[in-house]
């Protein structure tokens, strides 16, 4: 007479229903009716293996259709405005970082294309005279947060080189006052660098709104005051524009039609900025700055050396991508890669801007 083997308690501790339960009971009856019986430990392992897939399935979180498409593909401007409007515009201090508001942090998490769509929709709102004053004011505040996010956006390569520079400074045996001074100098150069991919867009947005006579004086003054804040408190304005603002003021510079152009003739990159621009291979860096960095580093390399040859090839490739070919190799900056083919009245006013020197 065959020995009766107790049924494993695993099934009773974790009851299963449905197909998994049927499968388990079938396997158990087939084992009991067999001529050869397995040890209890073998039975336990069989029961565990039979129940394991069901346990994993039960623990798998259910994702709704809305949740599955709640990421970037389903991003829309209206939803972004509603989300951003629910956040506070008040800036809060952060340790070892510049102050930031929840609205700014939301805008910073978007892509450059999404920021462009968002700021366009917000500008339509604060320009709409039929909208309530509260709605216009809210849209303007959010639009300013988007500009702040643009000014503080850096490429990954630029950020890595800045972190390396800070690490090298910290590794030096310097007195605390000198170390603090060097750290602050590096941060100021980093936050005011022309290498930022969205700086030109943000500054020109400020100039366009401040200089628009169709807007109310209150709106223009609000935007001008925020630009002054970025100039003096956050120090995120490039040196050349900083000098022009010091001479003409935000309102005067905007009314003159000034815009940041694409040639960057007035920019002198630091060694680390040039290295970051070269390593970027022209990605997320203005082509004029990439070409300027290649020219400067090639002039410092020994003629005929491997680095000189490599920089020459990279320079020719960058010029070809910028549409220059080899015609502009003698100029200090790639002035032939301007976006506009013919001067507009705004460009003519800009050409009459006095120098900041």
Image (spheres, helix red, strand yellow):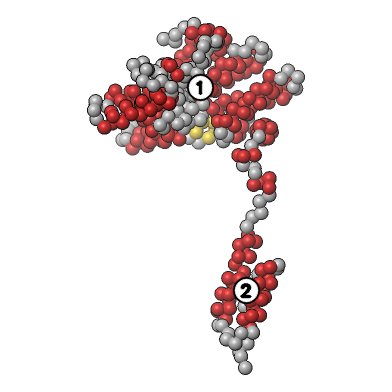
Badge 1 vs badge 2, beta-carbon distance below 8 Å: no
Q: Quadrant of the N terminus?
A: bottom right
Image quadrant in which you'd find residue 355: top left
Q: What residue do we see at 59% from left, 27% from top?
A: 116
Question: What residue sits right under mark 2 in the picture?
Answer: 10
- Residue 287 position by quadrant: top left
Dot 2 crowding, Cα within 10 Å, few <14, some 14–19, many 20+? few
Nearer to me, 226 or 41: 41
Q: Residues within 10 Å of mark 1 (few under 14, many from 20)?
A: some
Which residue is painted at 27% across and 27% down in the image?
A: 301
Looking at the image, which residue is at 66% across and 32% down?
77
Q: Secondary structure at mark 1?
A: helix
The residues bearing labels 1 and 2 have C-alpha atoms spaced at a distance of 66 Å
Residue in the foreground of this view, choosing between 78 and 172: 78
Q: Which residue is mark 1?
A: 200
Q: Is residue 29 above or below residue 127?
A: below
Earlier residue among tags 1 and 2: 2
**For the image shown, how many numbered marks are present on the structure?**
2
Q: Specify the farthest residue to the bottom.
A: 1
Q: Quadrant of residue 180?
A: top left
Q: Quadrant of the C terminus?
A: top left
86 displayed left or right of 346? right
355 sits left or right of 23 in the view: left
Q: Position of residue 267 (x, y in %)?
A: 41, 19
Residue 175 in sight from this viewpoint? yes
Residue 189 visible to the viewer: no
Residue 54: give x, y in percent of width and height. Answer: 63, 65
Looking at the rendered structure, the secondary structure element under dot 2 is: helix
- Identify whether 76 is placed above or below 253: below
**Which dot marks residue 320?**
none
Residue 128 rendering spot, x and y as whole percentages: 71, 20
* Residue ID at (40%, 25%): 320
């Amino acid at each position: 007479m065959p020995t009766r083997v107790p049924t494993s308690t695993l099934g009773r501790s974790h009851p299963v229903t449905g197909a998994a339960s049927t499968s388990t009971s079938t396997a158990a009856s087939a084992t009991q009716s067999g001529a050869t019986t397995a040890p209890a430990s073998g039975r336990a392992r069989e029961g565990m293996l039979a129940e394991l897939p069901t346990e994993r399935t039960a623990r798998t979180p259910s994702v709704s259709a809305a949740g599955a498409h709640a990421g970037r593909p389903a991003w829309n401007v209206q939803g972004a405005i509603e989300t951003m409007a629910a956040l506070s515009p008040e800036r809060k201090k952060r340790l070892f970082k510049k102050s930031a508001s929840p609205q700014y942090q939301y805008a910073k998490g978007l892509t450059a294309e999404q920021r462009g769509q968002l700021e366009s929709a917000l500008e339509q709102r604060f320009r709409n005279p039929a909208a309530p004053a509260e709605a216009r004011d809210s849209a303007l505040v959010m639009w300013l947060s988007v500009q702040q996010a643009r000014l503080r956006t850096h490429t990954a390569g630029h950020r890595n080189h800045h972190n390396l520079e800070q690490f090298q400074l910290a590794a030096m045996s310097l007195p605390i006052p000198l170390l603090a001074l060097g750290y602050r100098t590096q941060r100021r150069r980093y936050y005011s660098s022309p290498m930022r991919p969205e700086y030109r867009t943000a500054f020109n947005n400020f100039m366009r709104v401040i200089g628009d006579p169709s807007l109310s004086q209150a709106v223009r003054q609000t935007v001008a005051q925020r630009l002054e804040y970025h100039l003096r408190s956050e120090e995120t304005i490039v040196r050349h524009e900083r000098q022009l603002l010091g001479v003409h003021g935000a309102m005067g510079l905007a009314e003159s039609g000034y815009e940041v152009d694409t040639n960057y003739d007035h920019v002198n990159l630091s060694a680390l900025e040039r290295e970051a621009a070269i390593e970027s291979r022209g990605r997320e860096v203005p082509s004029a700055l990439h070409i300027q960095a290649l020219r400067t580093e090639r002039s410092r390399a020994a003629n005929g050396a491997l680095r000189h040859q490599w920089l020459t090839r990279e320079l020719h490739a960058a010029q070809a991508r910028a549409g220059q070919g080899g015609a502009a190799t003698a100029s200090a900056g790639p002035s032939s890669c301007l976006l506009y083919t013919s001067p507009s009245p705004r460009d003519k006013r800009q050409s009459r801007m006095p120098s900041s020197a």
